[in-house]
Image (spheres, rainbow, N blue to C red):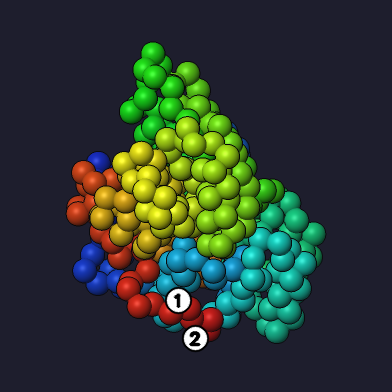
C-alpha cells in the first residue's frame, strides 16, 4: 500500500462525480474501510482512480445471483465497460435467484475450471460460498466480493458499500420527517430475501435509524427480489394493515408498489421509499411516485471490482475494501445527479462476455 497515494487522492466535498463519457468515470468519490474487511472499521474518504490499461487480456469470471432486476443490470454494465476499457476478458454467469445457492457454487466451479484467472462474486449468501472460495484461494486465484457481502476470510478484496448505511439512510430520511413527539406513522418494511448478507445489514441499519422516532414498523416481509413476489408482499401487507403510511424496501418493492398504490387509490395516502437505486426508482422519484432512495453507484462498484482484480493479478497496489460514497436522491437533487455512474443507460441489455 506504499504507493496508494498515487492512485487515491484525498476526497473533496463534491458528491456527484461524473462525466459525459462513460470511459471517463473517474476520479470517483469513494470510501475505503480501515482495517479492511472489519465490521466496525473506519470509513476514510478517498478518490478512486483505476489503472489506465491492463498489461494483458486477463480472464475474469463474474458470478451474479440473478439478472431479474435493473440493479444487477447496472452492475453488469459496470463490469462490461471497465473490462473493455482495461482490455480484459470477462465471462459472466447468473444463478437465477436467491434460492439458487447450489447453482451459483456450481457455476463458479465451472468458471474456474475453464481457466478464470480472477473471480468476482455477487453472493447469494454471505456464508454459503465460503467453502468454494477457500478452494479457489488455494489455487492462488483472487476472489473479489462484489456488492452483496461475503464473510470468507479468504477474499482478496471487496468492492461494495455498507448496506447497513443504505438501510440507515432510508430510515434516517423518514425519522427526520417524523421525529419523536410527532404522531406515529406505520411502515411496511420489505428488506429482501431472508439470509442474504446485504438484506440483514440493511434491515439492521433501517431499524437502528428509526429508533426513538415516530416511525413504527408494523410488518417486516422477506422475499425474493422478483417483481411478482414483491408485488404480492405489498398487496398482502396493505390488505392486512390499512394503517400503513409508508412502503419501504428494495428497489423492486418500490417499483412494484407504485402500481399497487395507484390501483387502490392510495396515492398521497401511502408513500414509497427504496433503500437502493434502480432506473425504475429513479424515474419514480422524477415523477413524484417515490419519495427518495439512497444511491450506491452500482455501476461504479462493478467497475472498481474489475480494476481491483487486474491490480491484484498484476501485483500492483490496490485498495482491499472500498465502495462509492452513498448519497440520498429525492426531488430536491435528482436533476443534479450524474446518472451514468449510478444507473445503466436506457436500453442496455445484459452482456455475458466480451
Question: As displayed, is residue 184 above or below residue 74?
Answer: above
Q: Position of residue 237 (x, y in %)?
A: 56, 43
Asked whether the residues under the numbered discs 1 and 2 touch, taking CB atoms below 8 Å apart as contact, a structural biologist would say yes
Residue bearing the label numbered 1: 80
Tell me the residue at 27%/50% (across/down). 288
Q: Position of residue 82 (x, y in %)?
A: 42, 73
Crowd tier of the residue under label 1, counting other residues whose Cα lies within 10 Å: few below 14, some 14–19, many 20 or above: many
Observer-nearest of 212 and 321? 212
Q: How many labels sit on residues?
A: 2
11 on left or right of 351:
left
Question: As displayed, is residue 303 above or below residue 285?
Answer: below
Tell me the residue at 53%/56% (across/down). 231
Crowd tier of the residue under label 2, counting other residues whose Cα lies within 10 Å: few below 14, some 14–19, many 20 or above: few
283 on left or right of 275:
left
Observer-nearest of 90 and 252? 252
Q: Position of residue 25 (x, y in %)?
A: 31, 65
Q: Secondary structure at mark 2?
A: loop
136 on left or right of 118:
right
Corner quadrant of residue 143: bottom right
Tell me the residue at 58%/80% (across/down). 91
Precedes in sequence: disc 1 or disc 2? 1
Any part of residue 280 in sight: yes
> Marks 1/2: CA distance?
8 Å
Amino acid at each position: 500500500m506504499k504507493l496508494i497515494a498515487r492512485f487515491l487522492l484525498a476526497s473533496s466535498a463534491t458528491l456527484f462525480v461524473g462525466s459525459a463519457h462513460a470511459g471517463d468515470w473517474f476520479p470517483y468519490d469513494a470510501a475505503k474501510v480501515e482495517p479492511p474487511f472489519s465490521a466496525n472499521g473506519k470509513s476514510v474518504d478517498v478518490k478512486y482512480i483505476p489503472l489506465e490499461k491492463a498489461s494483458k487480456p486477463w480472464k475474469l469470471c463474474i458470478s451474479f445471483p440473478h439478472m431479474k432486476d435493473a440493479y444487477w443490470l447496472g452492475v453488469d454494465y459496470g463490469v462490461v465497460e471497465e473490462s473493455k476499457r482495461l482490455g480484459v476478458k470477462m465471462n459472466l454467469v447468473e444463478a437465477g435467484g436467491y434460492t439458487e445457492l447450489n447453482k451459483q457454487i456450481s457455476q463458479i466451479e465451472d468458471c474456474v475450471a475453464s481457466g478464470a484467472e480472477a473471480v468476482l462474486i455477487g453472493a447469494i449468501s454471505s456464508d454459503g460460498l465460503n467453502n468454494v472460495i477457500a478452494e479457489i484461494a488455494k489455487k492462488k486465484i483472487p476472489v473479489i466480493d462484489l456488492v452483496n457481502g461475503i464473510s470468507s476470510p479468504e477474499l482478496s478484496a471487496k468492492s461494495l458499500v455498507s448496506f447497513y448505511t443504505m438501510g440507515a439512510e432510508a430510515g434516517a430520511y423518514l425519522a427526520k420527517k417524523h421525529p419523536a413527539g410527532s404522531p406515529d406513522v406505520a411502515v411496511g418494511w420489505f428488506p429482501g430475501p431472508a439470509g442474504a448478507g446485504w438484506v440483514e445489514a440493511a434491515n439492521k441499519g433501517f431499524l437502528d435509524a428509526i429508533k426513538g422516532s415516530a416511525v413504527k414498523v408494523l410488518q417486516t416481509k422477506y422475499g425474493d427480489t422478483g417483481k411478482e413476489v414483491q408485488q404480492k408482499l405489498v398487496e398482502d401487507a396493505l390488505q392486512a394493515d390499512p394503517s400503513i403510511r409508508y412502503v419501504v424496501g428494495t428497489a423492486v418493492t418500490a417499483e412494484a408498489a407504485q402500481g399497487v398504490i395507484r390501483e387502490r387509490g392510495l396515492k398521497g395516502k401511502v408513500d414509497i421509499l427504496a433503500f437502493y437505486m434502480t432506473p425504475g426508482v429513479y424515474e419514480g422519484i422524477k415523477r413524484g411516485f417515490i419519495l427518495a432512495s439512497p444511491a450506491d453507484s452500482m455501476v461504479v462498484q462493478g467497475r472498481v471490482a474489475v480494476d481491483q482484480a487486474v491490480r491484484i493479478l498484476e501485483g500492483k497496489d490496490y485498495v482491499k475494501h472500498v465502495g462509492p460514497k452513498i448519497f440520498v436522491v429525492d426531488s430536491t437533487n435528482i436533476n443534479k445527479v450524474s446518472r451514468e455512474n449510478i444507473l445503466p443507460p436506457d436500453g442496455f441489455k445484459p452482456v455475458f462476455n466480451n
